[in-house]
Structure formats: structure tokens, C-alpha cells
């Protein structure tokens, strides 16, 4: 065993680093603190369907038609799996599909 002033730490596949080297290596692996408010929130198709009060199939049809922007995390033969829709995209879809401008009275 080595002395405490010559302490080494095993990292990865057999490379030996001193504590100072380890700190430098770790500082490059972890990004600076991220403000959680700046990270966009993503929803899955079921969550979007619940918000829009439509079926999940309708959400997939909106995505396929290009009316609702989405990101695909994986693939599937029958339907795209791992589809995620940004909350901002849902808000944009709702504002774009508004029939009358806000403030106008809709005939009953």
C-alpha cells in the first residue's frame, strides 16, 4: 500500500489517476448547473391526448400530418414508439387551431 501523500484512485479500465487528475477529468464530464426552467418539458402521446381530450390515434395522426411537431426516440413497425412532444409544440398547436380570436363572442 502506498503512503497517504502519494494516494492513487482507480478509474475506468485500469488507468491510475491522482486525486488532482481525477478532479480535472471529472470537471470535463459534468456540465455546469442547468436552470430547470430552461429545460423544455416533453410529453408522450398519451399525455398530449389527455390535454387535447382526443384519442392517442388522433395525436399520432396530427404528428403524421405535420400539424403537431414531435421527436422520435425509437422506431416501431406499427406505430412510432418513444414519440415525445414538446409542451411548447402543444401550446403552438392550440394557438394555431383557434377558430376565433380571443375576445370575440362565439355564437351559441
Image: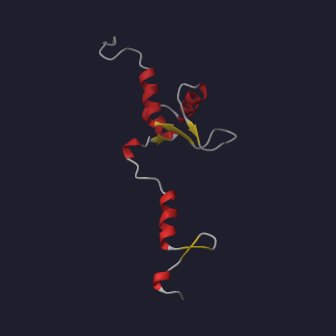
Q: Is residue 48 left or right of residue 81?
A: left
- Percent x, y of residue 60: 57, 33
- Say which residue appears at 42% left-offset and 30% top-offset: 91
The one of 6 and 90 positioned closer to us in this rendering: 6
**Whether residue 86 can be seen here:** yes
Q: Residue furthest right?
A: 77
The quadrant holding residue 38 is: top left
Query: Relative to 90, is 11 above or below?
Result: below
- Say which residue appears at 50% left-offset and 81% top-offset: 6
- Percent x, y of residue 61: 58, 29
Q: Residue furthest top?
A: 107
- Percent x, y of residue 51: 43, 35
Image quarter hosting the N terminus: bottom right
Total numbered labels: 0
The one of 54 and 81 positioned closer to us in this rendering: 81
Q: Is residue 7 left or right of residue 98?
A: right
The quadrant holding residue 59 is: top right
Q: Residue furthest bottom?
A: 1
- Say which residue appears at 52% left-offset and 33% top-offset: 55
Query: Relative to 69, is 32 above or below?
Result: below
The one of 92 and 3 positioned closer to us in this rendering: 3
Image quarter hosting the C terminus: top left
- Say which residue appears at 41% left-offset and 23% top-offset: 95
Please name the colour scheme applied to the rendered image: secondary structure
Q: Is residue 35 left or right of residue 61?
A: left
**Whether residue 53 can be seen here:** no
Amino acid at each position: 500500500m502506498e503512503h497517504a501523500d502519494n494516494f492513487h484512485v482507480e478509474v475506468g479500465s485500469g488507468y491510475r489517476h491522482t486525486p488532482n487528475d481525477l478532479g480535472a477529468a471529472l470537471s470535463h464530464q459534468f456540465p455546469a448547473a442547468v436552470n430547470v426552467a430552461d429545460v423544455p418539458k416533453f410529453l408522450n402521446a398519451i399525455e398530449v391526448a389527455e390535454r387535447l381530450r382526443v384519442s392517442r390515434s388522433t395525436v399520432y395522426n396530427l404528428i403524421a400530418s405535420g400539424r403537431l411537431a414531435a421527436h422520435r426516440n425509437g422506431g416501431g413497425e406499427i406505430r412510432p414508439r418513444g414519440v415525445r412532444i414538446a409542451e411548447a409544440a402543444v401550446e403552438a398547436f392550440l394557438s394555431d387551431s383557434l377558430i376565433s380570436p380571443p375576445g370575440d363572442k362565439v355564437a351559441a
